[in-house]
Amino acid sequence: MGKNLVYKILNSHLASGKLKGGEEIAISIDQTLTQDATGTMAYLQFEAMGVPKVKTKLSVSYVDHNMLQTGYENFDDHVFLQSIAKKYGIYFSKPGNGICHQVHLERFGVPGETLLGSDSHTPTCGGLGMIAIGAGGLDVAIAMAGGPFYVTMPKVVLVKLSGALQSWVTAKDVILELLRRLTVKGGVGKIFEYGGEGVATLTVTERATITNMGAELGALTSVFPSDAQTKKYLRMQGREGVWKSLKADATAQYDEVVEMDLSSLEPMIARPHSPDNVCKVSEIKGVNVQQVCIGSCTNSSYHDLMVAAAILKGRKVHPEVSLTISPGSRQVLEMITKNGALADMISAGARVVEVACGPCIGMGQAPPSGGVSVRSFNRNFEGRSGTADAQVYLVSPETAIATAINGVIRDPRDFGERIVIKFPKKFTVDDSMIIPPSEKPEEVTIMRGPNIKPLPKKEPLPDTLKGDVLLKVGDNITTDHIMPAGAKVLPLRSNIPAISEFVFEKVDKEFVKRAKEKGGGFLIGGTNYGQGSSREHAALAPMYLGVKAVIAKSFARIHRANLVNFGILPLTFENESDYNLFDQGDTIELPDIKNKLNSSSSIIVNNLTKNKEIKAMHALSLREIDILCAGGLLNYQAQK
Ligand code: MIC
Ligand code: SF4
């Protein structure tokens, strides 16, 4: 039987288990990446493991999130990250060098290798033929220490592309269409492998837009073959040497197939407040816009900014609109500066924002009250922009610029002929902002400012769990709901006591007070609980506040893994309607929990207030049960 591409790459990295859907597998990790907002914790965890040097082929630490230095915290974190990278064999990409996923694609990605990153958009490098997975910082720390990455073998879905994109229709519209069809839960437990004759028509940066935003489907990752387009991209980056051809066998089998005719697509738009709330741009009429943002790891490549500049050339941004441009990397910024494209955007009235995540994670550029912001980004969760009542739409850079010029959401096809961007033979390559590790690590001192607080500890699991329901939430709760980001909270990522004060801040202002008064307790969730980012703080801070278990209808993968890593039980209702039997304030008890976890997949949950007993399921592997019993992965590792 022919093999698909996912099977081939996973098989060559298989450390344990069988590549059979539903089984726990362990895969060896070639490369890791971290970004600053998750990296500080990941490196503290790595340090606690006592390993003298990373054991991966390559590990890179990026600074791209916490770049608004309004106090000492962020620069302190950067200094800590730079010093710890130097000591432990890690490359350090300085602030200003670019967004981790864009820079990793440009400078480090290798077809056929595995990459684990402490950021949910790590699958971006799937555009280069890597199996690139987002995970919590602790999982990345373990990979740096030479451990494999554990995951349940997902289903492999072939996205079979035919035809070619029409004028003004882009890779962003491909992934938005997929989100429209499959929703933010549609990819849970799946890997999307792209194939079919349409693949050859897409460049690597277009592919990377698709694999990047595949994260919004809830997928483990997405991957494209490595072909002539891949070779061309790597040649432009001066890295042709790492290219190799990778593709599925002609007779490869898949668990599911999704067909998409690229030529049938139109410009698409995700409406507030979810990336799957998608329709055609042409269906939206007369929405006035106050802000347009181009950037983020989804759409900030050389191609994206060149298209934006070409449309803006000789035109002006609408008087009522603020247009911001944040290039994805210093390479992109340098090239568009030298070739004049940046000047075209500036003379059109664009505001140039730093090379960083910036507005995507609410680090500056919050929209006005009740305002409409149209962005080339990947997430539009309520409040994420920094303005609670802003209406954020997600589109391609082409649609965004058409909108910026008009002041109203506008289909870019109204702009006449397609703009074709010519790529230079070679990109500007200057890695001087990537600092290699020290050759004398013993001489390096790790710098810890007052924002770097020690890791919180957790006790082993007791025999019985008892407490109150601290909060009951609905479906599709994101990690932005659980542990908000933004300019105020993000700088506290290396200070768990301080950041835990903001848990569920936007859902229920009293949550933290209640959790403290009650000495912790339980959370009740709907479907897809914890979707979105990889931030382990969404588990770590609730753990710090005493959350013992989350009982939900279903979980998003990364968050579920983070809960286990920090000793919080992720349980699902055996009977979904039992969700209705729980209310905030109910006292519940999970008797004899340790034995129950080990002896059965079903757990008894007593609602003492309602005098009802229900069953919850755990679907935990034996390894995960041991981790939970130990009180989290760090304790478990220490025991080992
Ligand atoms: C995001 O886009 O939500 C983030 C901020 O990049 C997160 C990581 C974080 O919270 O630090 C992610 O996607 O994993
Ligand atoms: Fe940064 Fe936004 Fe990408 Fe997250 S989604 S890595 S915040 S640019």
Image (spheres, rainbow, N blue to C red):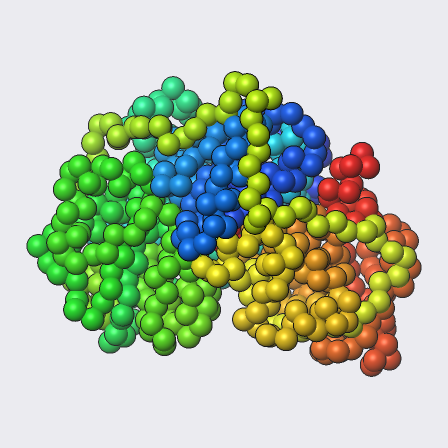
Q: Is residue 609 above or below residue 84?
A: below
Residue at (38, 71) in percent of width and height: 391
Residue pushed farthest bottom? 610
Q: Is residue 515 left or right of residue 451?
A: right
Residue at (67, 46) in percent of width and height: 454
Q: Is residue 57 left or right of residue 291?
A: right
Q: Is residue 3 above or below residue 472?
A: above
Give the position of the C terminus as an image quadrant: top right
Residue at (55, 19) in percent of width and height: 440
Residue at (68, 47) in percent of width and height: 455
Q: Is residue 240 left or right of residue 638?
A: left
Out of 54 and 116, give the one closest to the viewer. Answer: 54
Q: How many marks?
A: 0
Q: Is residue 307 above or below residue 389?
A: above
Q: Is residue 257 left or right of residue 311?
A: right
Q: Can residue 15 be seen in the rendering of this structure?
A: no
| Residue 3, image x, y percentages | 55, 32
| Residue 166, image x, y percentages | 24, 51
Q: Quadrant of residue 373?
A: bottom left
